[in-house]
Amino acid sequence: MTTSTGRPPARPLALITGVGRTVGIGAGIADRLAASGWDIAFTYWSPYDERMDWGVEPGATGAIADALAEHGAATTAVEADLADPDTPAQVFDEVERRLGKVTALVMCHCESVDSGLLDTTVESFDRHFAVNARATWLLIREYGRRFAATPGSGRIIALTSDHTVNNLPYGASKGALDRITLAAAHEFAHLGVTANVINPGPVDTGWMTDEGRAHMVRQTPLNRLGTPRDTAHLVDFLCSPEGQWVNGQLLMSNGGFA
């Protein structure tokens, strides 16, 4: 866990989940928001990376925190197993203790293991829903219970996907995430909080094969893949005062990917 001190009181605080690798979308979002004047708390979970082909990135947490500090942001990193239903409340407790109340909740965490209708196990299905759907609900619930910022300044943003073929538990649980997040646009109206979902399309953060990368480029009119920075710019806008009128939306930000 990494913490820096000296947070200017005027900077709002964003809690970003799923920031475990320097090349990830979460890290890109954290960097953009820090540059725009936000302090940043972020979560990571190394055992997930250990299970995946890319593995754990040594020193990533410290490198991300150092990069955010260069923008003048106070930062804190919390290791968090979001498959545990007690974790969301514990994350908010720790973040509030170290940096204060959260103004923006940006959820980039996920469980994503490919499998289809015939080979998905019950254990895998349940874990996907625990991380992608249940944890999203519990994080949003804690955010709503504790929200204390100026009405109109609060933001909830979640990343989603519409990929389901041979990716059943991931896609299905992301569909649940969509509905949970969008409900907050209405249920938290009394708090002046906006809630939106972003589908960033295919973003190569180290998981694509050469064949898959070439196929996705061919399916994108702009003839390139998405980058973490592409998603980060949209999140930055949604978190700004100018982005307040965008609310309750599932936004396709994928370069026209078909």
Image (cartoon, rainbow, N blue to C red):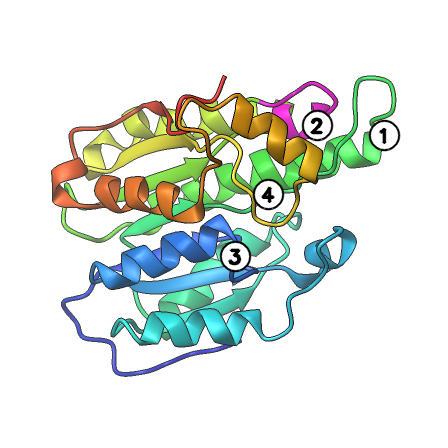
Residue 213 left/right relative to 115: left
Considering the numbered disc 2 on the image, is that residue within a helix, a strand or a loop? helix
Residue highlighted by disc 2: 169
Q: Earlier in the sequence, mark 2 or mark 3?
A: 3
Q: Are marks 1 and 3 in contact (CB under 8 Å)?
A: no
Q: Are marks 1 and 2 in contact (CB under 8 Å)?
A: no
**Residues in magenta?**
163-171
Q: Earlier in the sequence, mark 1 or mark 4?
A: 4
Q: Earlier in the sequence, mark 2 or mark 4?
A: 4
Q: Position of residue 252 (x, y in %)?
A: 39, 24
Identify the residue at horizontal 44%, vertical 44% (top origin): 227
Considering the numbered disc 4 on the image, is that residue within a helix, a strand or a loop? loop
Q: Is residue 165 above or below residue 15?
A: above
Residue type at the position of mark 4: Cys
Q: Position of residue 149 (x, y in %)?
A: 20, 53
Mark 3 vs mark 4, CA separation in Å: 15 Å
Identify the residue at horizontal 12%, vertical 39% (top origin): 242
Along the viewing direction, whichever of 237 and 224 lies nearer the viewer: 224
Along the viewing direction, whichever of 34 and 7 lies nearer the viewer: 34
Q: Position of residue 223 (x, y in %)?
A: 45, 29
Identify the residue at horizontal 37%, vertical 58% (top origin): 30
Q: Which mark is residue 23?
A: 3
Residue highlighted by disc 4: 110
Q: Is residue 230 above or below residue 92?
A: above
Q: Is residue 101 visible?
A: no
Nearer to us: label 1 or label 3: 3
Residue type at the position of mark 1: Thr
Along the viewing direction, whichever of 251 and 5 lies nearer the viewer: 251
Residue type at the position of mark 2: Pro
Considering the numbered disc 3 on the image, is that residue within a helix, a strand or a loop? loop
Mark 1 vs mark 3, CA separation in Å: 30 Å
Residue highlighted by disc 1: 121
